[in-house]
Amino acid sequence: MATKRIGDVVLDVKNISLAFGGVKALTDISFDVREHEIRAIIGPNGAGKSSMLNCINGVYQPQQGAITLRGRTYHGMSPRQVAEMGVARTFQNLALFKGMSVLDNIMTGRNLRMKRGLLWQALHIGPARREETEQRAVAERIIDFLEIQAWRKTPVGRLPYGLQKRVDLGRALAMEPSLLLLDEPMAGMNVEEKQDMCRFILDVNDEFGTTIVLIEHDMGVVMDISDRVVVLDYGKKIGDGAPDEVRTSEDVIRAYLGGEQTQPQRHRDTEELPA
Amino acid sequence: MLYRENGQFKTSYPADSQILPIRQDRIAMGLLLAAAFILVPMASSEYLLRAVFVPFLILSLAALGLNVLVGYCGQISLGSGAFMAVGAYVAYNCQARFEGMPLIVALLAGGLGATVLGVAFGLPSLRIKGLYLAVATLAAQFFVDWACLRLKWVTNDSTSGSVSVADLHIGSLSLESPQARYLLCLAFVVVFALATKNLVRGHIGRSWMAMRDMDVAASVIGIRPMQAKLSAFAVSSFIIGVAGALWGFVHLGSWEPAAFGINRSFDLLFMVIIGGLGSISGAFFGAAFIVVLPLVLDKLPYWTGMPMDTATASHLALMIFGALIVFFLIKEPHGLARLWATAKEKLRLWPFPH
Amino acid sequence: QAKEQFFPLLVYRTGPYSPNGTPWANGKQDYIKLINARDGGVNGVKLTFEECETGYATDKGVECYERLKGKGASLFDPQATGITFALTDKVPHDKIPLITLGYGLSASADGGVFAWNFPLMGSYWTAADVLIQHLGKKEGGLDKLKGKKIALVYHDSPFGKEPIPLLEERQKMHGFELIKIPVTAPGVEQKSAWLEVRKQRPDYVLLWGWGVMNSTALKEAQATGYPRDKMYGVWWSGAEPDVKDVGEGAKGYNALALNTSGQSPKVIQDILKYVHGKGQGTGPKEEVGSVLYTRGVVIQALAVEAVRRAQERFGKGKVMTGEQVRWGLENLALDEKKLAALGLTGVIRPISTSCFDHQGSTSVRVHTWDGKQWNFSSDWYQADEALLKPMVKAAADKYAAEKKLTRRTSAECQS
Amino acid sequence: MTAPLLNVNGIEVIYNHVILVLKGVSLQVREGSVVALLGGNGAGKTTTLRAVSNLLEGERGEVTKGSIELRGERIEKLSTSAMVERGVVQVMEGRHCFAHLTIEENLMTGAYTRKDGRAAVAATLEKVYAYFPRLKTRRASQAAYTSGGEQQMCAIGRALMANPKMVLLDEPSMGLAPQIVEEVFEIVRDLNAKEKTTFLLAEQNTNMALRYADYGYILENGRIVMDGAAAELRENEDVKEFYLGVGGEGRRSFKDVKSYKRRKRWLA
Amino acid sequence: MGPFLETLIGGLMSGMLYSLIALGFVLIFKASGVFNFAQGAMVLFAALAMARFAEWIQKYTGLDGKLAVNLLAFAGGLAVMVVVAWLVEWLALSRLVNQEGITLLMATLGIAYLLEGAGQMLFGNDIYKIDIGLPKDPMFLFEQTFEGGILVSKEDLYAALIAAALVAGLSLFFQKTATGRALRAVADDHQAAQSIGIPLSRIWVIVWSVAGFVALVAGMIWGSKLGVQFSLSLVALKALPVVILGGLTSVPGAIVGGLLIGVGEKLSEAYLGSLMGGGIEYWFGYVLVLVVLLVRPQGLFGEKIIDRV
Ligand SMILES: Nc1ncnc2c1ncn2[C@@H]1O[C@H](COP(=O)(O)OP(=O)(O)OP(=O)(O)O)[C@@H](O)[C@H]1O
Ligand SMILES: Nc1ncnc2c1ncn2[C@@H]1O[C@H](COP(=O)(O)OP(=O)(O)OP(=O)(O)O)[C@@H](O)[C@H]1O
Ligand SMILES: [Mg+2]
Ligand SMILES: [Mg+2]
């Protein structure tokens, strides 16, 4: 495996606060993400992890603080602008386009790169057709990569949950992002499928050098594949550092990993099983 | 065993993304088109052409347009009657005011007029959704109804507010015969159906569907909600506008605003839902259901041999019509087009059940 | 094979206008049955008919037209203004005349341009004209109308807007103030219209409604305290369904009457005897002779007479084509004697048409509702030819110009 | 041995008249037991649960073969609410909270079928709050505006409000923080022990499920491919490899998965 | 000042009558997420039933106390509406569980056709009369202060009072009762509601019966105003903007919406209408709605539309 080429800070989140009416989803959160790294965000339910992602890609506008992405600082940018800067994401509660096929879902990820106007499209000749074919080739590469060839033409609504998650990832990858935000990509999967998913994430990270921000509740996964971890709790940051540091932090254990459980998850998993 | 795609492999992406990937379907479509262009005008009575096929085609076209908006982009509209009206009146004004304007140009101008209105009334869709939007679009319906009655220049100062068009012709070709009118409508329908199909399988169509299915996710992917929705409104109202112009020019010949009243809007919405949201063929199924079924039901007393007075017969027809709507929705909530697709799927597996 | 003259009947027995459409349709049907039962048809030609339900909708009407025209129709009565407009364009090609007795385009009285339309017995212009004459008479002279306020409460559609040009013309002549108050179809919500009436306090209200709009207007007038005896309706606003459920509240309300109501005329008696008496009546017996029923009878009678007249020229005992029936319609000459033979004495006035006059008569009376029935409250009026003729001609010429039509010459009138 | 509480007998389920999903699934659940239904994505776990609780209709699915018995009574034709009245409640996959209702209202709707009076319901509500304190703090906010995990808790709590005899839990652990997952399973164990509630749970988190269940079924591609006592299943090499993620030499790091990929034997 | 007040009062009372119809929509939507386009047809059907029952009761039993006849006819109408509710549930809704809103909406349009056809076939399509003794003549207030006084339609006043009472009762029902809560749950998610044992069929029969009851009251009042005939089903169109303005899910919203639209359209017609050629009340309500929705997309009191990722 190639050694990681972790580089400069690409995303810098500074003093973000976000509240909905009385609910403080995020309070004064700061952290950064470096080029090529896999950055995990963990925390108990309702800690504000998803809200954090929503702030980064412009779905929510934080009341305070600023986000700097590749040198550009913003307070309120539209999701489209963020997307144009190469940020893609997946969603916790599957936000796929249910009525469309797998292929079409992934093709929508290429939308930013498709420029031919209405008339060309309506005629479907020459440039429009060529463009469609080019982008289709890219989409097909992603389909191959995610091993979902067999379901290419199936409406995503009919797919089992795990595959839908994979399509969601595919759609994000189709944007060829430089920064990929993943919101619980492995929820509801069994070990085998999680392994597959990890493989995809690691491949993307390695081969395309994509920077990844990952929210995940499976500590095994987080500890194994992430480079640095942020821990949120009730909208506040309670930890930030390498997986091992975080795992042993008192705060994190109390707030998140579970009271009596002081041992790292990976060991527990094996030890729990009678030999 | 006839209906199988075995052995038909696609070797290129364009081949794979053809409109009809299965050879049998292509043959069937070819036959259908040939029949529509050659057989029907030759073999049909004037009644069939004028009173069944022409309205069927025009309403299919309108339903096609509405389907772009409702079926593909997920914006429910109850204002299609208004867009048809605008199409008809703009086309009328073009012909009445500009001496010698070719018919086709006038019809397309009608479409453009409707587009302008469509975009204007599409703007609220950026904030208003679902049923709320549906009722809000009624504002267009009622406003246009009113304007067509009230604004004198809309009807070119006709005293009664009704307008009529002079003899239709394209170049030196007269469009008086039912065959000519039928073919004109058919040509429009075929061209627009093809263009719409092309749009919905391209990136613009995908951006519509994305807005429909999950708008937040769509915007995160980089789809501009405004652009996607307004383009859907524009395309949809253009097609509906052209259909309206055809309805006025080719079908009615002379009309008052009531010809494009709210019932028309409901009928069109009906067609796209009964026919199948988000499917091109759905528009045709739906239009057939709405246009042809009542005619068939009218004949009911004759078939049953029961003498029945007109009122009872039409009440009964109304009831059966309503019941059939409910029945089909229960049978297949996704419309007749889906029912057809399921039937085909079964045929593909035949003789195995699964 | 027996000879049969086919009459297509476009009717609406369902939908918002069915209470008015039904007696009308029944009258037409019963008259055909009467002719067959009593006279054995017209010179031996049996009359047949088929109804087609339009529901007052234009596109349904067009469909009905296309369907029935193929069955040998030689004349249509569309029973609706919208359908009339749509058919006006189609009939010249199919060579089938349209009877629009008391409705349709006012300008179509000009047979020189509207070769196939027959607004027999009057149009909305003649109606409006007569109403103003009547009001003038009540005030003691048309010049007394000066400074008076007359409100037109009208169905917001081409039907309701037709009288406006004439009223404006009369307004210029007599100096009364015309207040136009539109009511949106179908007319179930008229509160603001009547609040406006109350605010303006007009001396008279002319009601130009159809269907539910009429009874609602009367109820609103009651609710806003506008005197019903100051209200004058057109002949489509003066039938039983319009006042029936208003009852006492409509007492004193006036409307134009193209025909009588009641069961005394001979033709009605004959229908009761030959049709209902044999159990073949179309609607309930009580309704026979009601205003709209009788209007249906009159329309059908004129249609049958047109056929009879045509047979006189083109061969008795033959089935007439549309073109031949048109000739019959253009050469109607029903004097009192002939009317008497038809049992129409008193029901209508004599009527005689020509190639250029497709109206034939503009005679009309006013009747008043006494809480139970309609009673005539005026003598016959005629529309003012001097005023109307130029208006009709100008409008017809405009239409001809738009449609690039040339006027018929007298020579063309012969066939 | 006593007759099982639930007896599913060779059922076949078809969606939309054409998609055959379950191809003869049989399983038994004894009163007072915790049975786990395991299997990969799309194996048909949810479908099986839906067939039992009769929620298939709304998905345009139907049981075309086989039978389902609850305490010996055939139940395929019953309505879902009749099932709830018989004490069988399903917690649906993917939360399905009532978006416009507050958390507390959500919970209260769960008690809709109860006839034992306000006080009893209030007591259950307190119990649910005791199990999920987080819900108590969010009790007044609309469910749609709570986090994914909170919604999951709400869905489970709502089912408990019906005082069920048997709960069909579909992926209870999905999206929950490890601490809460643990809690949820503890609650399952607790209810099972104290109130003799029977559980049939569909889970991806095989490790957890097998730790808390008595018996397990493994479903693949619409067929039961393996079943046995939970302890036995945990020993099984295949289960270890494919469902628990432990190979011969212990648990493999997710980091190493790249170089390794094997297929299940029984799928080949 | 006089005409202004008159218009204002007239608008308020028209608005109340709109609310009465709007209420039927809100009830069904709130309780099942179905936008019931058949509401207009239900009003017609109920009114036809009541009018004809009154007629028949008089004819065949010779009973002639107005109150007794009307009460019996009302009860008969209610029974018919309950049967309708049950049929609708059994034949249509129960088979459309978990379908999308728009499919259900279309189904209700089918039901509307069925009801219109059946209503006219069973009960006739002439004009019938409902006479519940509402006074038809107006009263005049403040005749000293304003010339001609301020006209108030007594009929409308009584009707508005009945509507207000009905609305108050129904909002209470939805506020806190367990059934009210269950109804809202069903509207949110059919399947989830089913999964916790809410019997959809029973709930729907209840709601449609209540909506039938509201339709009957509306039909009775509008019928006594307009006469009972087909056009009665068209007054539903006047209620649409009211429902949306108030918010689809809010019972009090239906009232406020009705009042606002009633007043707005009457005033606009009176004071702007003449500038624009009249008839603007035809669309005024809808345009008002459009404008309000731009500011509040869920209507004035509707539940916030939730979209989250
Ligand atoms: N409503 C439906 N219509 C058509 N097919 C469906 C439907 N629901 C599920 N399926 C199909 O049935 C199969 C089994 O689905 P099911 O949801 O039962 O699996 P599962 O084991 O619960 O999977 P997961 O772990 O992802 O939840 C899948 O292939 C799915 O695509
Ligand atoms: N649009 C919103 N309106 C109101 N409150 C919100 C909104 N979005 C999030 N919240 C609240 O903010 C808090 C954080 O939510 P968020 O979804 O970010 O949590 P999370 O960390 O992703 O939790 P989980 O792991 O359960 O997904 C929650 O309490 C939630 O109720
Ligand atoms: Mg989250
Ligand atoms: Mg599942």
Image: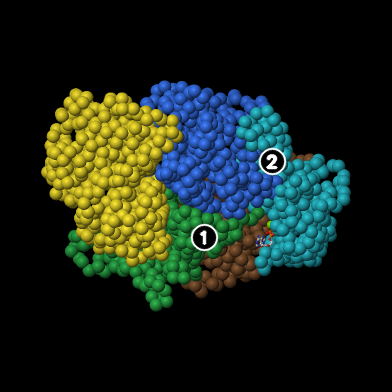
Chain colours: A cyan, B blue, C yellow, D brown, E green
Mark 2 Cα within 10 Å, few/some/many (few <14, many 20+)? many
SS class of the residue under badge 1?
Answer: helix
Identify the chain of the residue marked 2, using the numbered disc in the image: A
Residue A20, numbered circle: none
Which residue: 48% across, 27% down? Answer: B169
- The x, y position of residue B219, in whole percent, is 67, 48
Looking at the figure, which quarter contains the N terminus of chain A?
Answer: top right
Asked if residue D154 shows in the view, the reply is: yes
Asked whether mark 1 lies closer than 8 Å to ligand 2, one says no
Residue C306 located left or right of residue E186? left
Residue C328 located left or right of residue C268? right
Number of numbered discs present?
2
Which residue: 39% across, 34% down? Answer: C89
Which residue occupies the foreground of this view, E238 or C74? Answer: C74
Q: Within the displayed image, which quadrant is ligand 3 positioned in?
A: bottom right
Which residue occupies the foreground of this view, E170 or D143? Answer: E170
Q: Identity of the amino acid at label 2?
A: Asn
**What residue would you read off at disc 1?**
E245
SS class of the residue under badge 2?
Answer: helix
Residue A111, numbered circle: 2
Which residue: 28% across, 25% down? Answer: C415
Mark 1 Cα within 10 Å, few/some/many (few <14, many 20+)? many
User: What separation in Å lies between label 2 and label 1 (alpha carbons)?
Assistant: 37 Å
Which residue occupies the foreground of this view, C216 or E114? Answer: C216
- The x, y position of residue B149, in whole percent, is 45, 47
Asked if residue C52 shows in the view, the reply is: no
